Image (tube, grey):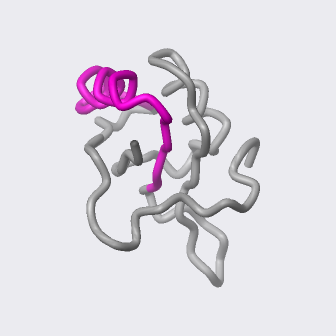
Amino acid sequence: MNIFVSNISFKVRENTLRELFSQYGTVERVKIIKDRDTQRSKGYGFVEMPSDEEALKAIEALNGFMHFERPLIVSQARGPHTSVSSSDSSDQ
């Protein structure tokens, strides 16, 4: 399942988000969306988890969770442009 995460602190990196979601199961990919020109985080991204059950647990637990002094907004991703890119999405 592809999960949409917003209100991410600009300090958070993909490996930090991976660690957070890994508490609830296997994480295949993480992608924080960045501005094309500045490479600065836009404050949202996607986490892909292969197990729908684990993904739903993560969504339930982390929606509203205070992370880096910001409440995360976590939901199932919707729409045609919600696929996580296959480019290297770890440790950024």
Front-lying residue, 79 or 41: 79
Looking at the image, residue 32 lies above or below residue 53: below
In this picture, residue 67 sits left or right of residue 73: right
How many marks can you see?
0
**Where is residue 29 drawn, in percent x and y?**
60, 45
**Where is residue 54 drawn, in percent x and y?**
39, 22
Residue 65, quarter of the rendered image: top left
Which residue is at a point 48% across and 36% down the rendered structure image? 49
Front-lying residue, 54 or 65: 54
In this picture, residue 87 sits left or right of residue 33: right
Q: Which residue lies furthest to the top in this view?
A: 23
Which residue is at a point 66% across and 71% down the rendered structure image? 39
**Where is residue 40 drawn, in percent x and y?**
60, 66
**Where is residue 56 drawn, in percent x and y?**
29, 28
Which residue is at a point 40% across and 63% down the rendered structure image? 82
| Magenta highlight on residue 59 | yes
Quadrant (top left/top right/bottom left/bottom right) for the N terminus: top left
Q: Residue furthest bottom?
A: 37
- Residue segment shown in magenta: 45-67
Looking at the image, residue 4 lies above or below residue 59: below
Residue 17, quarter of the rendered image: top right
Which residue is at a point 27% across and 60% down the rendered structure image? 78
Front-lying residue, 72 or 84: 84
In this picture, residue 43 sits left or right of residue 12: left
| Magenta highlight on residue 90 | no
